């Protein structure tokens, strides 16, 4: 077993879902850990998911993994890949393959091929390293280990961005997350390539991945030809305003898509209905910013039903102080009394109760009430 191979297998034993994978692969030939997982383990970090390539039939490995998983494997027939989710994490399994791109920028045609070919079809050398799980043997595309050592992103061949322009977004994402430099020839190829002609759904999927990065704006930095406008100062200010219970990815998505705001765009991103609601609310940030003035009760009237992401985005467009005050302080203010207290005091149940409570909350927000239940009750009954 070579030294880097040993490092990867040892680290895999401690990684999420690693022990499950090692146990399932025991005694099976041709099973390799590959891609970002190997890269991350060699860098001493924790992989986000485990990518496995089998040089041969993946069915026995899949059967064993599925036996230990709560649900069945999700199979993607077009690419002969499958995903198994075990309690500790996600394992993607594929047969080793080569790819052909009949239409540049389109989806590839795939056919089974030896591991060496599978490594050479990949995006960057640092993602083209595999370690066999039985013997710990490391196989890599030429220059891959040197590039990893030098923390360098290099394509494997000159047509890489032409065949798959979404790799332009992957390049920016890895540069931001890993802090790697782009090798000069690769930078030249990227500058000459374009996202034109790539379907909105594919760009959208990569955009989503960028937005889930720890620094979403850095992960999009320098990417040209996106169908969205990146207003970095607004997005950065909004990120600073967003409280911990907000979703930075949805907020920035909303900010970036404000000018091209279409339902079709949101649909293509595969978001849940709730997440789409947040994106749409952020599109209304300009209107909201115009309404964020006046006393705390006025802020309450304007903002109480808005998601925090929309308020932070609106604050970034101008009324930053009002947004900060609302998000940090005012939105948490509650009455100590409830509708049952008013009913108990003789007010008949009905919409009037809600109006009295709302009026009282407004007074409390504006500092017009003494502290405590008694003052609130007196205000609500008055
Ligand atoms: N890949 C590629 N071109 C793409 C997408 C993926 O060559 N457009 C290859 C890369 O070798 C990558 C592997 O497929 O390593 C798996 O892709 P993915 O799961 O998206 O990336 P990871 O390697 O897991 O890296 P990370 O999750 O850290 O982004």
Image (cartoon, rainbow, N blue to C red):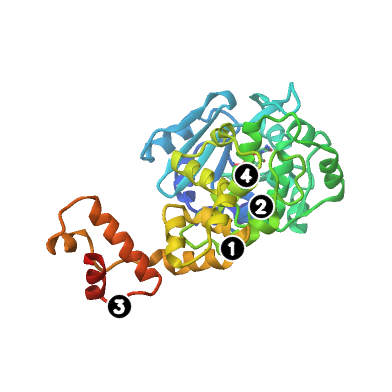
Q: Is residue 381 left or right of residue 97?
A: left
Q: Is residue 340 left or right of residue 209?
A: left
Q: Is residue 75 above or below residue 232?
A: above
Hey, which quadrant is residue 95 in on the image?
A: top right
Identify residue for label 3: 371
Q: Residue at 62% of width from left, 44% of height from top?
A: 258
Which label sits on residue 2? 2
Question: Sequence order check: which comes first, mark 4 or mark 3?
Answer: 4
- Quick check: marks 2 and 4 in contact, CB under 8 Å? no
Residue 317: x %, y % from top left = 63, 57
Question: In the picture provided, is 201 more to the left or to the right than 58?
Answer: right
Q: CA distance from mark 2 to mark 4?
A: 52 Å
Residue sitting nearer the eye, 261 or 112: 261
| Residue denoted by label 4 | 258
299 up-or-down from 186: above or below: below
**Residue 136 seen in render:** no
The Cα atoms of the two marked residues, 1 and 2, are separated by: 59 Å
* Comes first in the chain, label 3 or label 2: 2
* Mark 4 vs mark 3: in front: 3
Residue position marked by numbered label 1 in the rendering: 319
Residue 75 position in % (x across, y down): 49, 29
Label located before the other in sequence (1 or 3): 1
The one of 100 and 10 positioned closer to us in this rendering: 100
SS at mark 1 in the image: loop
Q: Earlier in the sequence, mark 1 or mark 2?
A: 2
- Badge 2 or badge 4: first in the primary sequence: 2
Q: Residue at the spot x=82%, y=37% of the render?
A: 193
């Amino acid at each position: 077993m070579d030294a880097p191979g040993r490092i990867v297998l040892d680290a895999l034993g401690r990684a999420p879902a690693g022990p499950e994978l090692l146990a399932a692969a025991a005694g099976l030939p041709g099973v390799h850990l590959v891609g970002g997982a190997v890269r991350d383990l060699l860098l001493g970090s924790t992989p986000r998911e485990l990518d496995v390539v089998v040089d041969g039939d993946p069915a026995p490995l899949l059967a064993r993994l599925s036996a230990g998983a709560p649900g069945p494997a999700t199979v993607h027939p077009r690419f002969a890949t499958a995903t198994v989710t075990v309690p500790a994490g996600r394992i993607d399994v594929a047969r080793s393959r080569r790819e052909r791109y009949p239409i540049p920028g389109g989806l590839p045609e795939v056919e089974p091929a030896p591991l060496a070919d599978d490594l050479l079809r990949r995006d960057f050398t640092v993602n083209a390293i595999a370690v066999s799980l039985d013997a710990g043997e490391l196989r890599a595309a030429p220059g891959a280990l040197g590039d990893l050592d030098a923390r360098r992103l290099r394509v494997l061949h000159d047509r890489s961005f032409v065949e798959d322009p979404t790799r332009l977004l992957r390049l920016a994402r890895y540069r931001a997350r890993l802090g790697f430099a782009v090798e000069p020839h690769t930078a030249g190829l990227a500058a000459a390539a374009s996202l034109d002609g790539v379907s909105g759904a594919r760009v959208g999927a990569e955009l989503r991945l960028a937005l889930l990065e720890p620094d979403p704006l850095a992960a999009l930095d320098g990417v040209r030809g996106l169908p969205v406008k990146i207003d970095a100062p607004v997005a950065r200010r909004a990120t600073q305003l967003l409280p911990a219970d907000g979703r930075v990815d949805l907020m920035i998505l909303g900010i970036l898509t404000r000018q091209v705001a279409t339902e079709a765009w949101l649909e293509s991103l595969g978001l849940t209905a709730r997440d789409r609601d947040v994106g749409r609310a952020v599109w209304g940030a300009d209107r909201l910013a115009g309404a964020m003035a006046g006393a705390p009760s006025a802020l309450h009237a304007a903002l109480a039903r808005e998601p925090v992401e929309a308020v932070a985005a609106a604050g970034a467009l101008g009324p930053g102080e009002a947004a900060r005050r609302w998000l940090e302080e005012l939105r948490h203010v509650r009455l100590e009394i409830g509708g049952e207290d008013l009913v108990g005091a003789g007010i008949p149940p009905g919409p009037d109760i809600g109006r009295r409570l709302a009026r009282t909350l407004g007074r409390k927000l504006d500092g017009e009430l003494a502290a405590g239940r008694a003052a609130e009750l007196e205000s609500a009954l008055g």
